[in-house]
Image: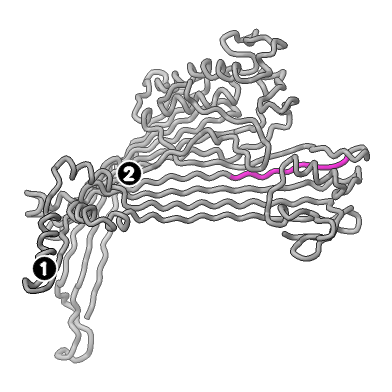
Amino acid sequence: MDWGIAPGDVPGNAIENSNQKTVAAEFKFNELYNKSKWLRKMNIASAGGSEYVPPLMNNTPGAQAAKDDKKQDDGQPSGVAKTLMRIVMALKRINVNYSENSGTRMPGYLDSTKLLGMNWQSMAPGIGFVLGKQPDKAWMDNFAKKGLLSPDTLFNIQFQQQFTQRLDIQAQLEPIRDLRIDLNLTRSFSKTHTELFKDTIGNGVFNHLNPYDAGGFEITFIAIKTMFGKINTEDGVSTTFRNFEGYRKDISERLGQLNPYSNGGSVPKYDPKDPQYRYGYGRYAQDVLVPAFLAAYTGTSPEDAPLLKNSNSSVRSNPFKNILPRPNWRITYNGLSRIKPFTDFLTNFTLTHAYTGLLSMNSYNTALMYYDPLILGYPAFRDTVSGNYVPYFLVPNLTITEQFVPLLEADLTFTNSLNIRVGFRRSRTLSLSLIDYQLSEMRSSEITIGGGYRVRGLPMPIRIGKDGANAWRTTLTSASTLVSATIRPSTTGWMRISLYQPAARKWSASRRLSTMWSITG
């Protein structure tokens, strides 16, 4: 904890604390499997190896008992049991990394500090605060009631808090020999909170004035169900976008039923100007558009779409906590070079498939007109211009980026050092603007064909030195030549809700030639 003396014209002092939490865990399942003799044999067999056990001399004491044990161990499980055990033992490793950083700065503190940041006579600011506890509204109200904050009505220094959180999980699976599956899941959330906490009229009652929050949110995501959907060439609109527009009614109905301020009878059930939507949740409401967008472009039902949270009880409160991260993956198989007829002319034959997807909201912030008088976690104030309830958090932009890198790629190395690589990639970027209600969709495909050839031990007609007999004769120990060609067609469409703009198409192609030389004398 830090304690600072305020300038002479500022009443009170400032106290700060911070809290850092880190968890790093690694689970090595191979070592767990090897604890069992039977599972170890299954593990070695699935990896294509064998376990060597040194033979015992016939005249060694206990040799007969060892032979009996070996006979029992030689009993092999059935093919079904082997298959099931390979699936169960496919998980080889899991890495988990979690970090959390938070901090608070409270101005106007009237007490002093001594040993370990505490005044042990008054027990202020409290053991919890000194150990890094992050205050919430109830803690702050109780702190002010004790007379520990400046009662100056002209006090205007803001209370500040910050919070960051990140989770990374990686897993490695090997269900069969030479087949490797890498999974990756990430989630990051950041938030800063400021407010003016003061006594406005000098009666000892402190108020939380002008609360403001801002931050970002990003998770690994999956939206491949709609990635290959066709775009209508006439109007440039996809079927998925049509679903997005239609799902808004379902989301509006869900929100209208959940919001207590919409069900008290004091407001109409449906919007008089747009009777297809619930009152306060029109077709352009943010709380309607975000879940409808996620449901449409992930290919799920609008009834199951996650809704945004409007409660903000502490700096840890995450409005997007209902949107769960989903794992990305990379699959590699290099066992084809062991199979006939490839083994006769290939030294390596690798197939690769990978998918990465991200959902990000990088600049959400607080709406100053949000009003929740009964603290129910739902908005009660309806904007007279838009006719929609004002949510606590405003999200100006929502982006989904996904790529098959690659969708499929084959890498072949022949016995004569010739290398050939053929790959196909696909990507899509969706950007939903909640300012001008426009959705841009950019799709691109990429076909890459490449090859290379390596020469070793080739004498070069170059001599270094004055004496020809003693001159060094250079040798080309390694020379590699790589050639690649890429064709990249792309399509970009801008779709404003209820207005459509035809998609633009673009083609590009590139070629590359590179050579690497390594010369020694």
Q: Specify the farthest residue to the right.
A: 202
Residue 333: mark in rendering = none
| Dot 2 and dot 1 residues touching (CB under 8 Å) | no
Position in image of residue 165 (x %, y %): 56, 48
Secondary structure of residue under mark 1? helix
Q: Compare marks 2 and 1 and give the one earlier in the sequence.
A: 1
Q: Quadrant of residue 17?
A: bottom right
Give the left or right position of residue 412, taking residue 102 as reference: left
- SS at mark 2? strand
Residue that badge 1 annotates: 63
Residue 421 seen in this snapshot: no
State how the image is colored: one colour
Residue 23 lies in the magenta stretch:
no
How many angstroms separate mark 2 from mark 1 (CA)? 52 Å
Q: In this rendering, which labeled residue sits more in front, label 2 or label 1? A: 1
Image point 60% across, 17% down: which residue? 256
Q: Tell whether 126 sits left or right of 86.
A: right
**Amino acid on which the number 1 mark rests in the picture:** Ala
Front residue of 347/473: it is: 347
Please name the residue shown 48% across and 30% down the image.
Answer: 440
Q: Residue at x 31, y 42 (%)?
A: 509
The mark found on residue 354 in the picture is 2
**Left or right side of 55 for 394:** right
Give the class, few, some or many, for how many residues have Cα within 10 Å of label 1's Cα (few <14, many ≥20): some
Residue 144's x, y, as percent?
83, 45
Quarter that holds the C terminus: bottom left
Front in this rendered view, residue 453 or 435: 435
For the record, the magenta segment spans 190-199
Give x and y (percent) for residue 78.
Answer: 13, 43
Residue 243, by quadrant, is top left
Say what amino acid the circle numbered 2 marks. Answer: Ala
Give whichever of 143, 260 is nearer the camera: 143
